[in-house]
Image (cartoon, coloured by chain):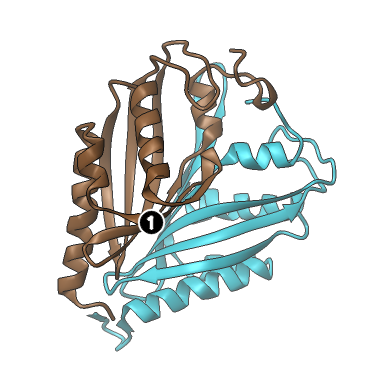
Chain colours: A brown, B cyan
Amino acid sequence: MTSSVLTGTSTKTVQAFLDAFARHDVDAAMAVVDPRASVTVHPLDVHAQGADSLRTVLEDLLRGFPDLMISVSRVITTGDVVTALLRAEGTQAAGYAGAINTEKHLDIEQAWRFATGGGVITGVAVYWCQAQLYRRLAVKRYDEISIA
Amino acid sequence: MTQTSTGTTRTAEAAAAVVTEFFDRYRAHDVDGMTDLCSITAGFSYVPVEMWGKQRVLRGDGTVGTMGKPLWAGLIAAFPDLSNTVHTVTSNDDGDVVVQADIEGTQQGAWGLITPAGKHYSEPHLFIFHVGPDLLIDSITGYWNDAGISRQLGHNEVD
C-alpha cells in the first residue's frame, strides 16, 4: 500500500502538469516529466520512450488548437498512478493529425493515466476517440483524412 | 477503508478483486454474471459511443441495466470470440479502480454500421470503475479509440 504522503505527492505532480498544460505552458508541464518517461498516446499511435515525444504531442495540440481549453473533471489517485479525466476544447487553426484546417470547433473527452515516482511523471498513457475528433473536424474517411 | 453494515470491508484490494472478477466473467461471456457484480442503479458511460442522427446524437450513457448489458450482449453476438486481456489494475480505499485492458474479437455479425468481413480487432481500453461500500460496482466509464476498431475491421467511413 502506498503511503498517503507519496499519494499526495503523485497527485500534486500530476496537478502541476495539468495546470501548466491548461495555461499552455509546455515547458512548465514538461518540468515534472522524467526525461526517460514512457509515452503512449493510443489515438495517435504514439508508443515512445522519452519525454520529447510528449512535448511534441502537447505542442502539436496547441499549434492545431491555439485556443485549447483543458477542463479537468476528475483526478483519481490509485497509489502512484494518477488518472485525469478531462475535456479538451478548441478551434482548429492548423492541420492536426492529418486533418486539414477547416476552423471547426472541437470538444473531446479524454483520459490521461500518469505513472509517477520520485516526484516526477515516469509514464503517461492517453486515451481519446479519434473517430470523435475526425467527426468534429469534418473528416469523412480514415483513408482520406486530409480531404474534408 | 470502509466497514459496511454487513461487516464487509472495502479496501483497495477488495475493490480490485471485484473488478478483476468482472473481467473474468466478461471473458467468459457471462453478461448476467457481470451485471450481478453491479448495483441495480450502476452508472454507465462508454465515452466513444455516439451515433449522430439528423436531429440528435445518441450517446453511450445510462445505467448498466439499460445501456451496458445490451451493449455487452450485442458485442458478444457480433464478435463471438470476444475476449479481454487485463494489463494493469490500480485501486484505492475509496473504491476507485482503474484498468488498462485490450478488448479483441473477430467480427461475425453487424456491429453498428460495420458489416461483418471476418476481420479481427484488438484495441487498448481504459476503464474507470467505482466499487461501493457493499462491494458492488456502482459506476463504469470506458475510453478507447473507436477509429482504431473501425479501421481494423475494414470500415473506413467516419460515421
Q: Is residue B93 above or below residue B108?
A: below
Q: What residue type is labelled 1?
A: Ala
Q: Quadrant of the C terminus of chain B?
A: top right
Asked if residue A114 can be seen in this view, the reply is: no
Q: Residue at x 49, y 19 (%)?
A: A137
Q: Observer-nearest residue: B57 or B148?
A: B148
Q: Mark 1 lies on which chain?
A: A
Q: Is residue A122 above or below residue B155?
A: below
The picture places residue B73, in percent across and down from the top left corner, at 67, 55
Where, by quadrant of the figure, is residue A79 drawn? Answer: bottom left
Q: Observer-nearest residue: A92 or A120?
A: A120
The picture places residue B106, in percent across and down from the top left corner, at 78, 52
Circle 1: element type: strand
Left or right, residue A5 beside residue B22: left
The picture places residue A44, in percent across and down from the top left corner, at 52, 38
Where, by quadrant of the figure, is residue B110 drawn? Answer: top right
Asked if residue B155 can be seen in this view, the reply is: yes
Left or right, residue B73 beside residue A85: right
Q: Residue furthest bottom?
A: B7
Q: Residue at x 56, y 42 (%)?
A: A45
- How many marks overall? 1
Q: Mark 1 points at which residue?
A: A37
Left or right, residue A47 beside residue A78: right
Q: Observer-nearest residue: A140 or A99?
A: A99
Q: Residue at x 53, y 67 (%)?
A: B87
Where, by quadrant of the figure, is residue A56 drawn? Answer: top left
Left or right, residue B76 beside residue A93: right
Q: Residue at x 30, y 68 (%)?
A: A80
Neighbour tally class for label 1: few under 14, some 14-19, many 20 plus, Cα within 10 Å: many
Q: Observer-nearest residue: A115 or A56?
A: A56
